[in-house]
Amino acid sequence: MINGALWLLGCQLVGEVVVRWLGLPVPGPVLGMVLLFGVLSVRRPGPGSGTLRVADGLLRHLQLLFVPVTVGIMVHAAAVREQWVPVTGGLVLSWAAGLVTVAGLVTLLVRRRGVAPGDAS
Amino acid sequence: MSATLEYLRTSPLTWIFVTLLAYRVGVWLRDRTRGHPLAQPVFIAAGLVMALVAAVDIDYGTYMEGGLLIHVLLGPATVALAVPLHRQAHHLKEMLVPLLVALPVGTVVSIGSAVLMVRALGGDRALELTVAPKSATTPVAIGIAEQIGGVPALVAVFTMLAGLLGAVLGPGLLDRLRIRDHRTRGLALGAVSHGVGTSRALHDHPTEGAFAGLSMGLTALLTSLLVPLVIALL
């Protein structure tokens, strides 16, 4: 457990330091994720590994970790209410447009790549 | 007596306990309704906490003294997304091209449509710049808004709302589009609804969660690179 926590926090810490040091436009934890992915690919830990158990435990309750930020919505409720039409339209329609674009493009490309080897032969 | 009540009202301990309890109620409701789309634990928990915070008349800052102790775990949890991704590594190679094409295009569509939609519906320039980075995970979106002149505090709100849309409506919309491939569903959810969409995806299917986590990370990176560009073009 302690080892698992050390790996997670260590990767985040390195990520945060590198991001600040090089002035990268990425969040530290995201770089930490890439780093841990690299570590796991090299070390290939067994299913009993502390890192895997701590990670699984955290991710099982990922939604809990978003509760404090979400409560912050109450502070800005008035500002949102003032411009609720453009806010709602901008959020909902643009969210749906993004979802449909990514889902559609991936489906299209996966299908094409599935066909490609047959075409080549 | 009143000193005790005052302690209870303002102690960080109270608010950690309340947040956990509210989340527990949210999980119970989700299980009770057999995963009804509206019964997202984060949605229910935040609603309950907001009601209590308002009822005992404290400000968000006082709540956050406790809430922060939960909030800081978001960092290590983001790092932890490497684990489901590692378990899916064998799927990664075959998805590389779709991923490298769909995510940049999707990011441009997310940013561009948000700006144009706000403009078309009569929002001001500050609002356009504030909605633009909404698909990126909260800390990234806040950083971008500060750079381009949006309202950082509001960005957090819009980002959370984009996340909640993904948790509540995302899987249903993907069903309607007849997209059943878990890799594709995960990539789409992570691209528009970051961590909140990812947590819903993780709950629905491990492969979906892994790809959502990957997509969320790449989208954060792409959004920070593309927002200034798209804004300049529009």
Image (tube, rainbow, N blue to C red):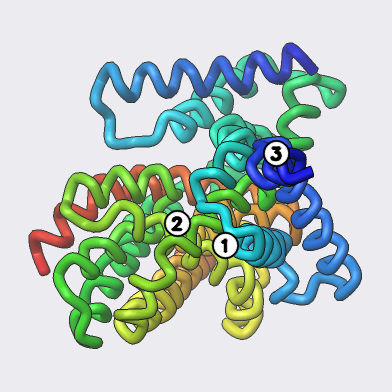
Residue A96 to residue B202: above or below = below
Q: How many numbered circles does the render carry?
A: 3
Residue B109 place in picture, x, y as percent: 31, 69
Badge 2 sits on which subunit? B
Mark 3 lies on residue: B7
Tell me the amino acid under the disc marked 1: Thr
Answer with left or right where residue B232 lies relative to residue A20: left
- Are the residues flagged by discs 1 and 2 in contact, CB closer than 8 Å? yes
Horizontally, residue B177 falls left or right of residue A82, namely right
Q: Which callout, 1 or 2, points to the residue nearer the camera? A: 1
As measured in the structure, the alpha-carbon distance from the residue carrying label 3 to the one carrying label 1 is 49 Å
Q: Please report contact status of discs 3 and 1: CB closer than 8 Å, yes or no.
A: no
The residue under the point 30% across, 65% down is B131
The answer to whether residue A99 is visible is: yes
Question: Amino acid type of disc 2?
Answer: Pro
Q: Position of residue B37 (x, y in %)?
A: 71, 75
The residue at the point 54 percent across, 19 percent down is: A11
Q: Earlier in the sequence, mark 3 or mark 1?
A: 3
Of the pair B149 and A101, the residue shown nearer to us = B149
Say what secondary structure mark 2 lies in.
helix
Quadrant of residue B52 in the image?
A: bottom right
Is label 2 on the same chain as label 3? Answer: yes
Looking at the image, residue A17 lies above or below residue B178: above
Judge from the rendering whether residue A64 lies leftward or rightward of residue B157; answer left or right.
right
Looking at the image, is B175 positioned above or below residue B226?
below
Q: Which residue position is annotated with label 2?
A: B98
> Closest to the observer: B51 or A27?
B51
Q: Amino acid at mark 3?
A: Tyr
Q: As displayed, is residue B147 above or below residue B182?
A: above
Outermost residue toward the front?
Answer: B1
Q: Which mark is residue B94?
A: none
